[in-house]
Image: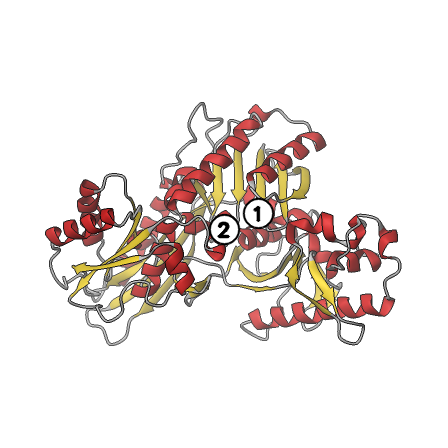
């Protein structure tokens, strides 16, 4: 057996899967303010719905909104510094130059420039000055910096200077948490640096959250390894999550899309995940979310780490419904996890989309008599507004005029019509309400290579084969069963105007998680 859990802004969903992947039990509980409490409640609800021996659980997969919420709310972020290696280049645009001021203040952001960096072909911009690094380290200590992001120009090509700078800083400041940009972002200095600084600011929070999640699972008597969902639909172990919390930012919509693919059997489609607060629209390609090919803005910060191409709109089960039948509006404001306290069907005083669904006979929750008085024309207008807004979002995600099947998941998908304008029939597979938790439970393990290669004449196939082999090795090192790994994507983009056959190659490989049974003490490390 394995358990999948997805923590959303409104609900915490959990599923218990059998060894053959069948759904033995599925529950939906309210997310709590401390989030871990919702996980405890979800595990208890699973036990009550389908009694199971905790020792028989072989793995627990969790998707969480902890880290993205902390950044958006600018709370619980560690005092962080950004050290860039690139002088005499790059001085005109210092680290965090494009950050919102409130987030710079939230991380007590300090920026340092030092010599180092490489050109695209591996040539040095300048030599590393270790005495310069030691002076910067002394200043960091004097200003209470607890987490550091190190970024070197073109470090995806050569990580030499980042690794050496980390050694020098660690020798001076042993307690400093250090994040390296070549492990987090892609080509693009400012975006990669931003992603690394965000990761560094979340490191302390990550340690506490991982400990809390582990304690929640252990408290239920489950000794199985714990994994967290990543942005690309694959898994990471808890130790990896401590080091790279930014990898979880989009795990919610990604889990829903992966779950939609498994439940519907459709690998290439648009997925609409209607939750309690938002509706997330994404596109699946071969069962995995289509990744964003451009920079992604997170809380107003430009980044370029792996993120799915998802369009979110403020429509969900907890969305506030305002206006009249002639001008009905739904969202973007939501009651969130307070739905069971504030919605009309639960005795509250706020008209929500859930109340509209119950009044229209599309859902059977709460007390339907409490919404019997609603104007039928208002109910109809609200549903039409939801359908129109979601149809527009799906149309914006299309990249061609070819027909694209639509799969609807999430508890709030009852708000959608059976036929969506411009897309046709809406598929709702069995267990659609907990597709996010199912997506977490069936997630695979991935490995990726994304960097610039110099391809000499006649060696293209040799370089591509080496990149494929490296991606497979990374997937196996992350915990994938060796004979299950397959190469999912190979992107090859020649870089114009640069000599030496410079080509950006990206290879993604995935495989099934290799389960080792229950842990006996500390959380298992899958070798990431």
Residue tagged 1: 439
Q: In this view, does 47 lie above or below 193?
A: above
Q: Is 232 displayed left or right of 345 in the figure?
A: left
Q: What element carries label 2?
A: loop
Crowdedness near tag 2: few (<14), some (14–19) or many (≥20) residues, C-alpha within 10 Å: many
Q: In this view, does 191 lie above or below 465?
A: below
Residue 428 in view in this figure: no
Residue tagged 2: 233
Q: Which of 343 and 498 is in front in this view?
A: 343
Relative image position of residue 341 (x, y in whole percent): 73, 48
- Location of the C terminus by quadrant is top left
Q: Quadrant of residue 31?
A: top right
Residue, x 41% and y 39% (percent of image)?
207
CB under 8 Å between discs 1 and 2: yes
Relative image position of residue 309 (x, y in whole percent): 50, 63
Relative image position of residue 112 (x, y in whole percent): 23, 58
Residue furthest to the front: 142
The numbered mark, 1 or 2, whose residue comes first in the sequence reads 2
């Amino acid at each position: 057996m394995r358990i999948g859990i997805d923590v959303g802004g409104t609900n915490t969903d959990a599923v218990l899967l059998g060894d053959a992947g069948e759904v033995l039990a599925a529950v939906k509980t309210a997310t709590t303010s401390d989030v871990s409490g919702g996980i405890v409640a979800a595990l208890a609800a699973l036990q009550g719905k389908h009694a199971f021996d905790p020792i028989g659980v072989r793995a627990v997969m969790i998707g969480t909104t902890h880290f993205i919420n902390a950044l958006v709310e600018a709370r619980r972020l560690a005092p962080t510094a950004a050290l860039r290696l690139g002088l005499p280049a790059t001085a005109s645009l210092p680290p965090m130059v494009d950050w919102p001021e409130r987030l710079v203040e939230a991380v007590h952001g300090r920026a340092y420039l030092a010599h180092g960096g490489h050109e695209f072909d591996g040539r040095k911009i300048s030599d590393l000055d270790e005495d310069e690094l030691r002076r910067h380290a002394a200043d960091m200590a004097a200003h209470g910096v607890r987490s550091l992001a190190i970024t070197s120009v073109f470090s995806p090509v050569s990580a030499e200077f980042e690794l050496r700078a980390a050694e020098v800083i660690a020798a001076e400041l042993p307690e400093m948490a250090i994040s390296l940009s070549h492990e987090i972002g892609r080509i693009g200095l400012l975006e990669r640096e931003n992603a690394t600084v965000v990761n560094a600011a979340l490191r302390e929070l990550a340690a506490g959250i991982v400990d809390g999640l582990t304690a929640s699972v252990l408290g239920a008597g489950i000794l199985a390894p714990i994994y967290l969902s990543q942005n690309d639909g694959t898994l990471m172990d808890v130790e990896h999550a401590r080091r790279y919390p930014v990898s979880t930012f989009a795990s919610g919509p990604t889990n829903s899309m992966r779950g939609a693919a498994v439940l519907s059997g459709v690998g290439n489609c648009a997925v609409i995940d209607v939750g309690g607060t938002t509706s997330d629209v994404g596109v699946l390609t071969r069962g995995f979310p289509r990744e964003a090919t451009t920079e992604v803005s997170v809380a107003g910060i430009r980044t370029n780490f792996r993120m799915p191409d998802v369009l979110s709109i403020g429509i969900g089960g907890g969305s506030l419904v305002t206006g009249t039948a002639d001008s009905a509006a739904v969202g973007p404001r939501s009651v969130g996890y307070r739905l069971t306290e504030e919605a009309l069907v639960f005795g509250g005083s706020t008209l929500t989309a859930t109340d509209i669904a119950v009044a229209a006979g599309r859902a059977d929750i709460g007390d339907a008599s409490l919404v019997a008085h609603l104007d039928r024309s208002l109910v109809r207008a609200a549903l039409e507004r939801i359908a129109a807004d979601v149809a527009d979002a799906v149309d914006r995600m299309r990249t061609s005029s070819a027909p694209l099947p639509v799969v609807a998941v999430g508890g709030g998908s009852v708000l959608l019509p059976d036929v969506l304008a411009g897309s046709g029939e809406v598929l709702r597979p069995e267990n659609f309400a907990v597709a996010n938790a199912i997506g977490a439970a069936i997630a695979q393990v991935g490995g990726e290579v994304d960097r610039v290669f110099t391809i000499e004449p006649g060696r293209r196939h040799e370089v591509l084969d080496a990149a494929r082999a490296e991606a497979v090795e990374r997937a196996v090192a992350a915990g994938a069963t060796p004979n299950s790994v397959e190469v999912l994507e190979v992107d090859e983009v020649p870089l114009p105007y640069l000599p030496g056959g410079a080509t950006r190659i990206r290879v993604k490989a995935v495989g099934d998680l290799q389960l080792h049974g229950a842990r006996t003490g500390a959380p298992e490390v899958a070798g990431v």
